[in-house]
């Protein structure tokens, strides 16, 4: 958790100003995400020493994942603007976290949900004549087909490793699957409008 927080600073233009993200907790999902994951890291560490803190840490982490996913629920990006985005983010946490801690049935459920969310989102958008909608399936199934197949194969292999009880093999394979999946999530989005409109939609969605 601490490594992820430090790593998240890498995409900021001015990391020294990151503290300002806390200023808009009432309206901004970004502010809530930063606050929740910032709280999750020490709670997760505390849970190692005080097991009774684990449920609280888990609850904060779950809400943090929800806040992170909500950042992408914006009309300007049709491939993201769906509850399937929230399901996808939740699936990543459910697949990776439990497999590390040995809760293999939960990990299997997470991997399955991740693959189902991917297929469902492509199916939802396919055949739509609008470029911002139909363009995403075209990228997944044609231009980036090799990466899409790689993501599915890695997910299926990770699921097989989970079901066979090979936990650490599953960790490596599922991490690779989710990295490829997250990359595809970003590169296959087709904007419905200019960035200015996107940010106006985002500001509205923060309320």
Image (cartoon, rainbow, N blue to C red):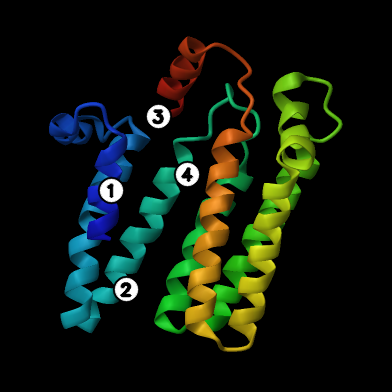
Q: Earlier in the sequence, mark 2 or mark 1?
A: 1
Q: Earlier in the sequence, mark 4 or mark 2?
A: 2
The residue that appears at 49% across and 71% down in the rendered structure is: 172
Q: CA distance from mark 4 to mark 2?
A: 21 Å
User: Where in the figure is residue 2, as x and y percent of width and height?
Assistant: 22, 58
Packing grade of label 1 (10 A; few <14, some 14-19, many >=20) is: few
Q: CA distance from mark 3 to mark 4?
A: 12 Å
Q: Earlier in the sequence, mark 2 or mark 3?
A: 2
Residue 148 visible in the shown view: yes
- Residue on which the image places disc 2: 55
- Residue on which the image places disc 4: 69
User: Where in the figure is residue 201, as x and y percent of width and height?
Assistant: 49, 19
User: Where in the figure is residue 4, as x and y percent of width and height?
Assistant: 29, 54
Q: Earlier in the sequence, mark 3 or mark 4?
A: 4
Q: Earlier in the sequence, mark 1 or mark 4?
A: 1
Tags 2 and 1 touching, CB below 8 Å: no
Front: mark 3 or 4? 4
- Residue on which the image places disc 3: 206
Q: CA distance from mark 2 to mark 1?
A: 25 Å
- Residue on which the image places disc 1: 7
User: Where in the figure is residue 158, as x and y percent of width and height?
Assistant: 61, 72
Q: CA distance from mark 3 to mark 1?
A: 24 Å
Q: Earlier in the sequence, mark 3 or mark 1?
A: 1
Can you say whether 200 is above or below 18 in the image? above
Q: Is residue 93 left or right of residue 190?
A: left
**Quarter in which the C terminus is drawn:** top left
Packing grade of label 2 (10 A; few <14, some 14-19, many >=20) is: few
The residue that appears at 15% across and 29% down in the rendered structure is: 17
Can you say whether 58 is above or below 90 in the image? below
Residue 91 visible in the shown view: no
Front: mark 2 or 1? 1
């Amino acid at each position: 958790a601490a490594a992820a927080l430090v790593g998240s600073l890498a995409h900021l233009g001015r990391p020294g100003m990151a503290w300002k993200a806390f200023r808009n907790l009432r309206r901004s999902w970004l502010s809530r995400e930063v606050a929740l994951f910032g709280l999750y890291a020490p709670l997760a560490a505390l849970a190692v020493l005080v097991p009774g803190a684990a449920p609280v840490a888990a609850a904060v982490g779950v809400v943090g994942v929800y806040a992170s996913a909500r950042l992408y629920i914006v009309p300007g990006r049709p491939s993201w603007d769906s509850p399937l985005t929230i399901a996808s983010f939740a699936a990543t946490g459910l697949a990776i976290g439990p497999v590390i801690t040995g809760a293999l049935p939960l990990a299997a459920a997470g991997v399955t949900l991740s693959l189902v969310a991917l297929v469902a989102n492509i199916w939802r958008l396919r055949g739509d004549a609008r470029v911002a909608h139909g363009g995403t399936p075209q990228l997944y199934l044609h231009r980036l087909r090799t990466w899409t197949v790689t993501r599915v194969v890695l997910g299926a292999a990770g699921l097989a490793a989970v079901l066979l009880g090979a936990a650490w093999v599953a960790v490596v394979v599922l991490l690779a699957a989710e990295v490829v999946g997250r990359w595809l999530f970003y590169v296959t989005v087709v904007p419905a409008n200019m960035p200015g409109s996107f940010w106006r939609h985002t500001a509205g969605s923060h309320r």
